[in-house]
Amino acid sequence: MTSANFSLRGIIQRLTESVGARGGATKTWAQYAKRWMEEVPLGGSERFQSQQEQAVRRTRFRCQRAAGVNPKMRILAPKLGESTKLVGSISASATTVVVASATVFPQGQNFRVRIGSEILEVTAGQSTTSWTATRGADGSTATPHGDGAGVRHMVVYDIESIAPADNRDRMIDITVKEAA
């Protein structure tokens, strides 16, 4: 399998529980596996059902099998055409991120982006090119990034079902819906 056929770098995440600073249980999403994926359009009755539920976007991702993937997990996948570049560099502790353009990103709501291998949650400034972000989101590690680094919008999808995509059990189809 090469990236030529599978051009989306998706992250499969699982919900983990740890003890917080005050001794209480804290739940967070953490990386389970990274896979090169391709988006496979829904067909037949699945497509019809998806069209009827206009507020919920359903799709399917095909990728190399990852043992243990189940419907309690989720996928972070890049949204095609929704990317920009950093303007200036940022340190690992910086919470202000300046980007070249923000027109293709969601306005007025939190969203996730990936810079290198780090996931950031944009929490303010969504309609501007100067964002406030939570660094090292979803169990990733905050790292410095240089001027011009690529910034990709990452969409959260809840896994609905998993099925073999071939008769050799090497590939799986993961049917997902965009998380609310």
Image (cartoon, rainbow, N blue to C red):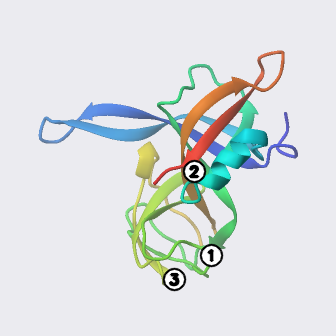
Separation of marks 1 and 2 at Cα, in angstroms: 21 Å
The reply to whether callout 2 and callout 3 are in contact (CB within 8 Å) is no
Q: Is residue 16 left or right of residue 48?
A: left
The reply to whether callout 1 and callout 3 are in contact (CB within 8 Å) is no
Sequence-first disc among 2 and 3: 2
- Of all residues, the one furthest to the top in this rendering is 168
User: Eyeballing the image, is 169 above or below 89?
Assistant: above
User: Which label is found at residue 117?
Assistant: 2
What is the x, y in percent for residue 106?
53, 72
State which quarter of the image contains the N terminus.
top right
What is the x, y in percent for residue 36?
73, 40
Tell me the SS state at disc 2: loop
Separation of marks 1 and 3 at Cα, in angstroms: 11 Å
Q: Quadrant of residue 79?
A: bottom right
Q: Quadrant of residue 151?
A: bottom right
Sequence-first disc among 1 and 3: 1
Disc number lying in front (2 or 3): 3
What is the x, y in percent for residue 103?
60, 81
Location of mark 3 (residue): 129
Callout 1: 10 Å neighbours few (<14), some, many (20+)? few
Sequence-first disc among 1 and 2: 1
Residue at x 58%, y 53% (from the top left corner): 53
Q: Tell me which amino acid carries mark 3.
A: Thr
Callout 2: 10 Å neighbours few (<14), some, many (20+)? few
Disc number lying in front (1 or 3): 1
Viewer-closest of 44 and 118 = 44
For residue 9, say whether it is visible.
Answer: no
Q: Tell me which amino acid carries mark 1.
A: Val
Location of mark 1 (residue): 104
What is the x, y in percent for residue 167?
84, 16
User: Eyeballing the image, is 22 above or below 163?
Assistant: below
